[in-house]
């Protein structure tokens, strides 16, 4: 008697964003940016790198898309600059915890 094919089911209750964050690894630039948020109140992520240059928008967007960072508030002086903070998953990744 043939057995029925089994479907893979995620029973962890994790959202799709959290599942994706567990599977992806940040690039060196993303990890550097995320780690800088560990030192800031509330996990605020910097708008500028250590050389005073604006953090690349692609780095910011990729971290938001992976669930490692989230928008925090609108920047009234520069509305097109995204002010972000670490998520719990981002805090763990930046701290070197395997997820």
Image: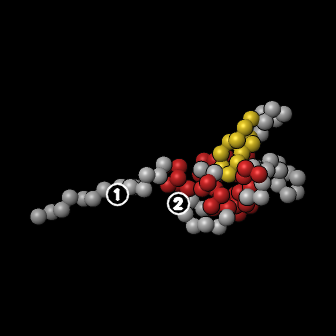
Q: CA distance from mark 2 to mark 1?
A: 16 Å
Question: Going 72% across and 52% down the picture, which residue do you hit?
Answer: 43
Along the viewing direction, whichever of 53 and 83 lies nearer the viewer: 83
Secondary structure beneath dot 1 equals loop
Residue 96's x, y, as percent? 65, 67
Percent position (x, y) of residue 55?
A: 78, 50
Residue at 77%, 58% (x, y): give it: 39
Q: Is residue 37 visible?
A: yes
- Residue found 85% across the figure and 58% down from its top: 50
Few, some or many residues within 10 Å of mark 1 (<14, 14–19, 20+): few
Question: Which quarter of the rendering shows the N terminus?
Answer: bottom left
Rendered location of residue 46, percent (x, y): 79, 50
Quadrant assignment, res 34:
bottom right
Residue farthest toward the front in the current orientation of the protein? 41
Query: Quick check: 75 above or below 89?
Result: above
How packed mark 2 is, by other alpha carbons closer than 10 Å (few <14, some 14-19, many 20 or more), is: few
Q: How many marks?
A: 2
The residue at 59%/50% (across/down) is 67
Could you tell which of marks 2 and 1 lies nearer the N-terminus? 1
- Most foreground residue, 83 or 42: 42
> With 4 as the anchor, is 42 left or right in this view?
right
Q: Quarter holding the C terminus? A: bottom right
Q: Is residue 62 something one can see in this rendering?
A: no
Place of residue 40 in the rendered image (x, y in percent of width and height, measured from the top left):
78, 54
Which type of secondary structure does the marked residue at label 2 adopt?
helix
Residue placed under numbered mark 2 in the picture: 23
Residue 25 located left or right of residue 84: left
Picture disc at residue 8: 1
The circle drawn on residue 96 is none
Residue extending farthest left: 1
């Amino acid at each position: 008697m043939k057995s029925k094919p089994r479907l893979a089911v995620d029973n962890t209750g994790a959202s799709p964003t959290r599942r994706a964050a567990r599977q992806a690894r940040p690039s060196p630039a993303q990890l550097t940016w995320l780690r800088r948020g560990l030192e800031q109140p509330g996990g605020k992520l910097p708008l500028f790198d250590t050389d005073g240059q604006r953090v690349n928008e692609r780095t910011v967007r990729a971290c938001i898309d992976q669930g490692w960072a989230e928008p925090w508030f609108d920047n009234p002086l520069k509305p097109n600059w995204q002010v972000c903070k670490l998520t719990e998953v981002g805090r763990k990744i930046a701290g070197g915890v395997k997820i």
